[in-house]
Image (cartoon, rainbow, N blue to C red):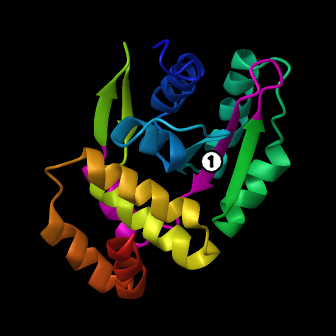
Amino acid sequence: MTKYPELKNLVKITKVLDELKISYYITGGFAVSIYGRPRFTADVDIVIKMSSLQVNNFAIKLHKIFPKGYIDKNQINNALVQKGEFNIIDPESGLKIDFFITKNNEFEKECFKKAIQQDFGYKVNFTTPENLIISKLIWYRDSQSTRQLEDIVSVMDIQKDLDINYLKNWIRKLGLNDEWERVKKS
């Protein structure tokens, strides 16, 4: 766990999610550090399925983990309504956790279904390397941030047994061919 000091807090958060039966998976830069080359990331990205009935208990339990942290129930409720995101910031550790409410589209359903557990003394749900690549392609299309392409190359360099047919199928379904061609030129 010392390789990633934020793991201690991540495990605490995922224990809360599991206890409250909030489905989740870790994605983004932190997942890149697990599947690709370790890199600095200022936050942890977690996609969740949460209902409005879970917000109060969720906020209470996370406030116990981060007593000085910024946890705004209104922001959480707005994210639920808009299928958007909210974050929790812990000033003591500097950790920022971005929670993305699932849009419940076909691709995200697949991500939840295929999530795999990484054991850090506690099993934490992560997106698969293939779904991380697809997510990064989507984020690249939306942001044009070359960081997304760098992350994809990093994962592809390390993960030698990727399911290329699975990748190509989702790239086609999601209309990510131009973004995929850009990765192949990197």
* In the displayed structure image, the side of residue 160 where residue 84 appears, left or right: right
Q: Which residues are magenta?
A: 89-115
* In the displayed structure image, the side of residue 178 where residue 39 appears, left or right: right
The percent position of residue 23, horizontal first and vertical second, equals 44, 43
Placement of the C terminus among the 4 image quadrants: bottom left
Q: Is residue 132 visible?
A: no
The percent position of residue 101, horizontal first and vertical second, equals 59, 57
Residue type at mark 1: give it: Phe
Name the residue: 63% across, 65% down.
Answer: 83
Q: Nearer the viewer, residue 179 or 101?
A: 179
Name the residue: 76% across, 23% down.
Answer: 63
Position above or below: 2 against 114: above
Badge 1 crowding class, 10 Å Cα cut-off, few under 14, some 14 to 19, many 20 or more, is many
Q: Quadrant of residue 134?
A: bottom left
Which residue is under mark 1? 99
Name the residue: 37% across, 12% down.
Answer: 121
Position above or below: 177 against 160: below
Q: Residue furthest front?
A: 186
Q: Nearer the viewer, residue 89 or 83?
A: 89
- Look at the numbered disc 1 and give the secondary structure of its residue: strand
The percent position of residue 138, horizontal first and vertical second, equals 48, 72
Position above or below: 132 against 125: below
Q: Quadrant of residue 125?
A: top left
Q: Quadrant of residue 177?
A: bottom left
Q: Is residue 157 visible?
A: yes
Placement of the N terminus among the 4 image quadrants: top left
Is 83 magenta? The answer is no
* In the displayed structure image, the side of residue 172 where residue 99 appears, left or right: right
The percent position of residue 73, horizontal first and vertical second, equals 80, 43
